[in-house]
Image (cartoon, rainbow, N blue to C red):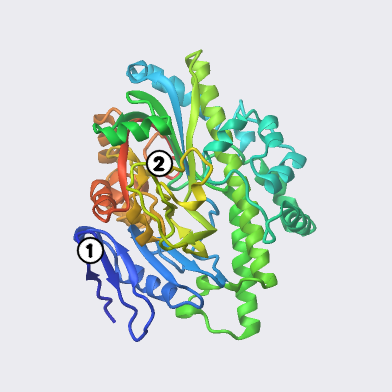
Amino acid sequence: MTKTIIPTGEATAILPTPGSATKPITVIGTEAIRDTFDDLCLQQAVNSRLAPGVTNLVLNPDAHCGYGAPVGCVMTSPTHIYPGPVGVDIKCSMSLLQLDLPADQIIDRPTRRALIEAICERTPTGAGRGQRHVRKSRYVCEGLGRQLLVEGASQDVCQQLGIPYDWTQHCEDSFHVGYDETPAALAQRLDRHLHEDNFKKRFSNKMQQLGSYGGGNHFGECEVVDVCDNDRAQRVADRFGLKDGRVAFLSHCGSRGIGHDLASGQFRSLQRHFETWNVPLPGNDRQLVYAPLGTQEANAYIDDMSLGANFATVNHLLINAMVLEAFQEVMPGVQGNLVYFISHNIARKEIVGDCLSVNGAGDSPDRATKPGKTEWVHRKGATRAFPAGHPELKGTKYETIGHPILLPGNPQAGSCVMVADEGASASCFSVNHGAGRALGRRRAFRELNQSAVDKSFDDADILSNCRAYPRDEAPAAYKDFNEVLRSVKSAGLATEVARLKARFVIKDGDKADD
């Protein structure tokens, strides 16, 4: 059956669930963007919306088919936890390091090549690669590996790895706890895993992936910050610590092999339980397994997700510390500070609905609202967007202005820093995590010409560590980023603060010629 999207505004729409009285799916996207949603993506959205305990389903402009739930969706539930709408790369995230280096200091190519080499000597790329593959890595012993999985970016963990501890104040979450909201639950869960032969054998190797990029769409990107030319953007940029015309570094990666192992194990375990329980799968999809909150199965998933999320957090912070070290090696005296670290593959317990507090100090008008409801918000390829006055920002530097939103586009169109507006309540305080794929990887390899892709980067004067830029990661493999941004702005979810213009890219180029 063809799914009919009903427009409700220039960049908003609803997708009803056939034969059901449930609340329709919220769709964010202009007509051009809505045309990019294929039937499988829409069917996955319907399956997810009709799954037990689900109260909201949001389809963002970057949405495309994934495993079970679409990549680029937000799903809420007060009663159930779902691994599918988190994915196998637990807490895949974005981070942005702002340097005090003027843009004209990296104009010449030899300087950028030296920076690429210095970074790659510290941060390996690729699915199976870790610190043993680079000369200037940080060694992670088994004891430290256990500690960071349980504690996240604690002061002691940061000190041992040479990470500035004050950077943790610029994190969406600098640590995660277990199902009972204690780290003790994580320690017990990890000990249980380490008594499993397969997990224990792989543990040391997985810990050596700390401070590394994976394959696929993971990247590190040297940027020049271009703050938007209006009073609000400049005021917000100043509060965020963005510096117009200066160099910054944007990173995209997640929990690497340890997160994949933990997530895959949870899928297998819950699928076995479903067979034992003889319970029907939502949409008959094995990737949409779930567990009712409060059960042993739900507790186990929350613990494993938190272990993976703690690795991802420390992974990003260490990458940023080593990137700063690399810049300082090539250009002594350069200083840098973390702007923000924000995830897009996580489930968090949050307040949703109309929950913004009176806000007299920010950019939004004064208003008082009724409290929202606490639910588990699953974001798969979606990132949180808390505006000024959101209760979760109370007591932080972002309370009266909203937190930074980091949206990667592509190296040639640029990436974006945004700040949420009050309208983000309509999307469960979430926005897309980037542009979203327009071509599947196999199709991109078939249809895109390697020489043309490489020439487009050369023409744009954007360097890369890759001998041949991966065709499945070329800009043409992704949706029109400007149209995606127009969708977010027109829907009233967020406002652009700055554009980030790429000068070089760190990618996994091993499969570029496949």
Looking at the image, which residue sits at the far top? 332
Report the residue at 23% width, 63% height from top: 35
Label 2 environment density (alpha carbons within 10 Å; few <14, some 14–19, many ≥20): many
Is residue 351 something that shows in the picture? Answer: yes
Label 1 environment density (alpha carbons within 10 Å; few <14, some 14–19, many ≥20): few
Read off the residue under disc 1: 35
- The answer to whether 391 appears left or right of 472 in the picture is right
- The answer to whether 138 appears left or right of 493 in the picture is right
Look at label 1 and name its amino acid.
Asp
- The answer to whether 199 appears left or right of 395 in the picture is right
- Secondary structure, mark 1, is loop
Residue 272 quadrant: bottom right
Quarter of the image containing the N terminus? bottom left
Compared with residue 122, is residue 103 higher up or lower down, i.e. above or below?
A: above
Read off the residue under disc 2: 401
Report the residue at 36% width, 35% height from top: 236
* Label 1 – label 2 distance at C-alpha: 34 Å
Sequence-earlier tag: 1 or 2 = 1
Q: Nearer the viewer, residue 474 or 345?
A: 345
Percent position (x, y) of residue 21? 37, 83
- Secondary structure, mark 2, is loop
